[in-house]
Image (tube, rainbow, N blue to C red):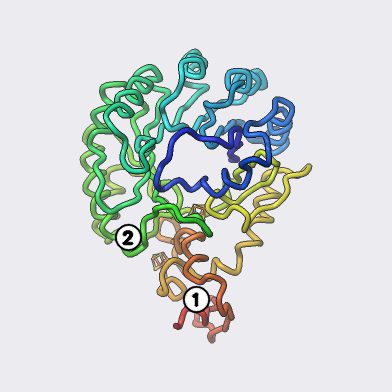
């Protein structure tokens, strides 16, 4: 997997936006949209990486003035297309997407994107729903959780009404490492976990599956809540790995929250090689996690999926330490536990 940034601009203003730092890096310094030549090189990169799906991100990718041409180029070379959008899509790119078969095209629509810096207003919701009705089964609804109170019920109703793909993609809003976006504090995770477990049962009754994006952690759910999620068929996972966001200026970034901190040049390399380079860059931080307890947590040290936990979002972890006094100590190994370093910096 790799995400291709094709637009560095967006016409909305979501409070939790984690691409803001990435986009602001290029304001006034670079072309805001990918060129056809550079996009062709990105397709070459995907091919040599044996990746069959083109994942288009921004900013807002559908603002690219040649969006239709880019999609056609990808389809001509046999790629399937996944578009990440705020959902307020203009007529031309929408027509382009609706002419593709649902087997070849999926559109992940962020349901709580907004101009207002708060929640979507009635006009935005109406416009987004009209777009989703046209996309039909190509539409996969997504929702970013950035505060402990949220309501996913309207998404269930819309999935039925518009015959969307029967799943909801859930994101936990994560902090930009050096930014000021609104994000969910790890102390708020258990409250979110309780709501999601209840909602998963409700969604399953409608034939809708919950899918977790990166940054979810094991301990935000009790054993009972985890059992409820699994019974409901939710795609439960504790991910934090470099999917690779490929920027307009050809950097492979671990993910947008780590822009400028964990990245490498694409050059002539393939995705597995780039991913490995980014994993090496993050290794030292992986020993810790979003909570002090992570360094000593059995889920992190011993577990196997779906029990094993990554320790949560690396951007959260790195913010927690803010690079102060990182020193490592090796405790005496315990039989069966290996020898995991503990971060002295946590004992503060
Ligand atoms: S590793 Fe950290 S975040 Fe994960 S379950 Fe353990 S304490 Fe929770
Ligand atoms: S650091 Fe990990 S969890 Fe956080 S946004 Fe990046 S990939 Fe997701």
In-front residue for pair 75/258: 258
Q: Residue furthest bottom?
A: 332
In-front residue for pair 47/250: 250
When asked about the image quadrant of residue 298, the answer is bottom left
- Rendering coords of residue 142 (x, y %): 38, 37
Q: Residue furthest right?
A: 268
Q: What residue is rendered at 44% in x and 23% in y?
A: 89
Q: What residue is rendered at 58% in x and 22% in y?
A: 67
- Rendering coords of residue 211 (x, y %): 38, 42
Q: What residue is rendered at 68% in x and 46% in y?
A: 251
Residue 52: mark in rendering: none
When the figure is inspected, residue 321 is found, relative to residue 204, above or below; the finding is below
Quadrant in the picture for the N terminus? top right
Residue 220: mark in rendering: 2
Foreground disc of the pair 2, 1: 2
Q: Is residue 101 left or right of residue 77?
A: left
Q: Is residue 77 left or right of residue 189?
A: right
At label 1, counting other C-alpha atoms closer than 10 Å, the crowd grade (few under 14, some 14-19, many 20 or more) is few
Would residue 339 be seen by someone viewing this image from the given angle? no
Would residue 75 be seen by someone viewing this image from the given angle? yes
- Rendering coords of residue 149 (x, y %): 24, 50
When the figure is inspected, residue 62 is found, relative to residue 275, above or below; the finding is above
Residue picked out by circle 1? 336
Question: CB at mark 1 closer than 8 A to ligand 1?
Answer: no
């Amino acid at each position: 997997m790799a995400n291709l940034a094709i637009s560095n601009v967006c016409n909305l203003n979501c409070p939790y936006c984690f691409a803001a730092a990435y986009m602001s890096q290029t304001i006034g310094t670079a072309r805001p949209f990918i060129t056809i030549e550079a996009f062709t090189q990105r397709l070459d990169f995907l091919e040599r990486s044996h990746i069959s799906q083109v994942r288009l991100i921004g900013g807002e990718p559908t603002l690219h003035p040649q969006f239709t041409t880019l999609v056609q180029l990808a389809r001509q070379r046999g790629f399937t297309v996944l578009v990440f959008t705020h959902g307020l899509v203009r007529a031309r790119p929408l027509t382009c997407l609706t002419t593709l078969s649902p087997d070849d095209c999926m559109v992940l629509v962020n349901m709580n994107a907004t101009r207002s810096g708060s929640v979507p207003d009635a006009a935005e919701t109406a416009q987004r729903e009209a777009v989703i009705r046209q996309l039909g089964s190509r539409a996969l609804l997504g929702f970013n959780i950035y505060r402990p109170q949220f309501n996913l019920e309207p998404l269930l109703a819309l999935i039925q009404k518009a015959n969307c793909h029967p799943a909801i993609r859930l994101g936990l809003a994560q902090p930009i490492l050096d930014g000021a976006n609104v994000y969910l504090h790890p102390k708020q995770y258990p409250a979110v976990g309780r709501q999601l477990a209840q909602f998963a049962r409700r969604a399953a009754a409608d034939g809708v599956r919950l899918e977790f994006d990166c940054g979810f952690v094991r301990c935000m759910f009790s054993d009972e809540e985890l059992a409820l999620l699994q019974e409901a068929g939710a795609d439960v996972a504790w991910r934090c790995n470099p999917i690779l966001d490929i920027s307009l200026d050809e950097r492979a970034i671990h993910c947008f929250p780590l822009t400028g901190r964990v990245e490498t040049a694409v050059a002539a390399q393939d995705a597995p090689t780039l991913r490995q380079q980014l994993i090496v860059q993050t290794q030292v931080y992986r020993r810790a996690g979003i909570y002090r307890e992570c360094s000593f947590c059995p889920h992190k040290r011993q577990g196997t999926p779906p029990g094993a936990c990554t320790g949560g979002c690396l951007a959260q972890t790195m913010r927690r330490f803010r690079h102060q006094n990182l020193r490592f100590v090796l405790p005496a190994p315990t039989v069966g536990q290996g020898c995991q370093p503990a971060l002295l910096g946590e004992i503060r």
